[in-house]
Image (tube, rainbow, N blue to C red):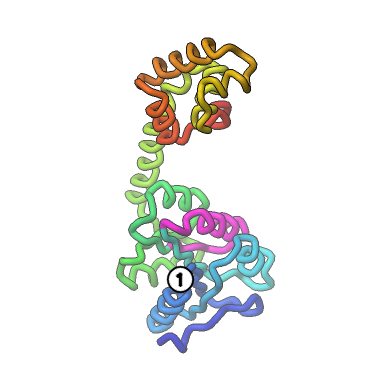
Amino acid sequence: MGQRSRETRPSEASRCVITDQRGLFAKAVAAALELDGIEAGTAPFNRADAMAVVFGKNHLVAPPVVVAGMTARTVAIGLDIIEALTDGGAPVVVLADSDVDEIVLAEAMAHGVAAIEATSGPLEDLTRAVRTAAVGETSIPLRRRYELENAVRSHRSAMAEKMRPFTTLTDRERQVLEAMMRGRRADQIADESFVSISTVRSQIRSVLVKLDVHSQLEAVALAHDADWSPEVAAG
């Protein structure tokens, strides 16, 4: 089966192109799709700009459907590739492993992908999604869209709740917390800030009270858990 799939070059736009960090997996998917009547090839899971040049709107012929494989380890570059491809006019079908977070899939949906399929799903679903995408239509069910949108809303609500205690900190208290996250002791913070150590200790106590924790270690752990930083707070 693997002999029927091939590497796709810029000069040839297959009806379907599979790109995945796992080269052998991409070739297996391409071979399976060809057996199901879809002309398929593979392309390296590479930089987003390279993919966009080959399969985006500036290509000499209409872009093929791109099946973009995604795992939890390739989320960042996967989303970059998806955004570049959809911006370039290529229809994209996401083929996601079970470990890919719903929030990531929601972001992919927001980029305008034509379908989101599971790696573990039946081949017929992927075949149907590719054929639907090829005619410019989406096959993401309305219920699935609602699920992903609700996942985003729940995530945002949870993140807002995590961030809520930090919104009560003053600018100076945020600076002190950031210094604590860098492992600075009270005397070091005092020296760097040109204030007395008693002032810094007072500021640290205020941070602990506002964050409802009992130690600097707990405060730092809470900040890391919330992905807090002064830049996030400012934004």
Q: Does the image show residue 160? A: no
- Give the prevailing secondary structure in the magenta stretch: helix
Q: What is the magenta range?
A: 72-94
Judging depth in this view, the residue of 51 and 92 nearest the camera is 51
Q: Find residue 48 and report its horizontal and vertical position in percent.
A: 60, 60
Q: Is residue 87 magenta?
A: yes
In this picture, residue 158 sits left or right of residue 21? left
Residue depicted at 40% across the width and 30% down the height: 222
Give the residue pinned by disc 1.
22
Quadrant housing the C terminus:
top right
Residue depicted at 57% across the width and 63% down the height: 90
Report which quarter residue 223 is drawn in: top left
Q: Residues within 10 Å of mark 1 (few under 14, many from 20)?
A: few
Residue depicted at 30% across the width and 70% down the height: 122
Q: Is residue 186 magenta?
A: no
Amino acid under disc 1: Arg
Judging depth in this view, the residue of 140 and 44 nearest the camera is 44
Q: Find residue 105 and report its horizontal and vertical position in percent.
A: 42, 52
Residue depicted at 44% across the width and 69% down the height: 130
Q: What kind of element bears circle 1?
A: loop
Report which quarter residue 83 is drawn in: bottom right
Where is 173 relative to 142, above or below? above
